[in-house]
Amino acid sequence: MSTAYFMGVDLGSTTAKAVVLDDQAKVLSAHIVQMGAVSRRGMEQAVESALASAGIAQKDINYTIGTGYGRRLVPEVGRTFTEITCHARGVAALFPEANLVIDIGGQDSKVIALDEQGLVDNFAMNDRCASGTGRFYEVLARALECDISEVGALAMKGTKDLEVSTMCATFAETEIISLLAEGADPADVAASVHRAIAHRALGLVAMVGKRDGIIMTGGVAKNPAAVHFLEAALKQKMQVPDDPQIMGAYGAALLALEISSGRQITQYDPEKVQALESKVEATFNPKNRSIPDCISCQK
């Protein structure tokens, strides 16, 4: 009997991720590509690399599900799901004890509350403001003249809590440069910005309710200072997957397996998932939006 293969593709705002599973839900390969905003080429490269690592061809994939900002651009998909559903699915499979997911990506941040079955119970999402996202950390790294991969380690060395008055990515660079010009230690600046970002993230958590069993996903979860200061703000520990960036693609691949084969790796309630998908689509449809966050923040 031949093996069946399933793929999840997460085309996000700044990275493309692809995960291939076999019919036993074993991860055969995972690949991440960063090539700019919602990059079709990045998606193609992630898929091609994941297939090559798994030793199979596109024709061998039984079912594919797309997720992320660019989910409708993913070719040969059986269905698409929002990243909220897919991150919840991936986290629930790896962490059965999870009750809350904090996902911080390149251009948005999400907090997802899970019910006892690992399904989405509630969510809050900020995709209109760069505050606290990977983009904000890039601004910080540029102002401090260091690589984005170094900014976390630098922040961990900071000892002073400096006042950071703005969380707007548009103005933050100017404020950071002003602090440096006043003689502030770069490590203290980095630490203070991380601390301020963590406290702002608490606002999203408050919208769904703080719970035990917190899992952090997304590219920012690879930043040790981001994890440290968020734990301090929450006053509790979080768990971080070995590869936090692929959780959405992993969850999509699990859904592909479950929907195609009828097997349940995690709880799958079609009616509840569809209701959630409709709610997410309605909430974040541009036609339903009013005052942009960047304007309301200035009031």
Image (cartoon, rainbow, N blue to C red):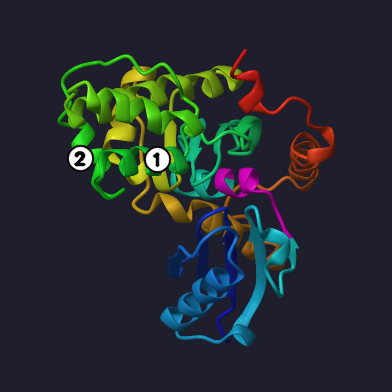
Residue flagged by tag 1: what amino acid is it? Answer: Val
In front: 159, or 282?
A: 159
Dot label at residue 8 = none
Q: Quadrant of residue 1?
A: bottom right
Question: Vertically, is 22 above or below 97?
Answer: below
Taking the spot 56% from the left edge, 35% from the top edge, the residue there is 110
Is the magenta region chiefly helix, strand or loop?
helix
Give percent across and percent down for residue 113: 58, 30
Between 227 and 132, the residue placed more toward the observer is 132
- Horizontal side, residue 130 vs residue 136: left or right: right
Mark 1 or mark 2: name the one nearer the start of the chain.
Answer: 1
Image coordinates of residue 79 in percent, x first then y, are 75, 62
| Local SS, label 2 | helix
- The residue sitting at 69% across, 28% down in the picture is 292
Residue 194 to residue 103: above or below: above
Q: Position of residue 163 (x, y in %)?
A: 32, 14
Q: Which residue is mark 1?
A: 139
Which residue bears the numbered disc 2?
Answer: 153
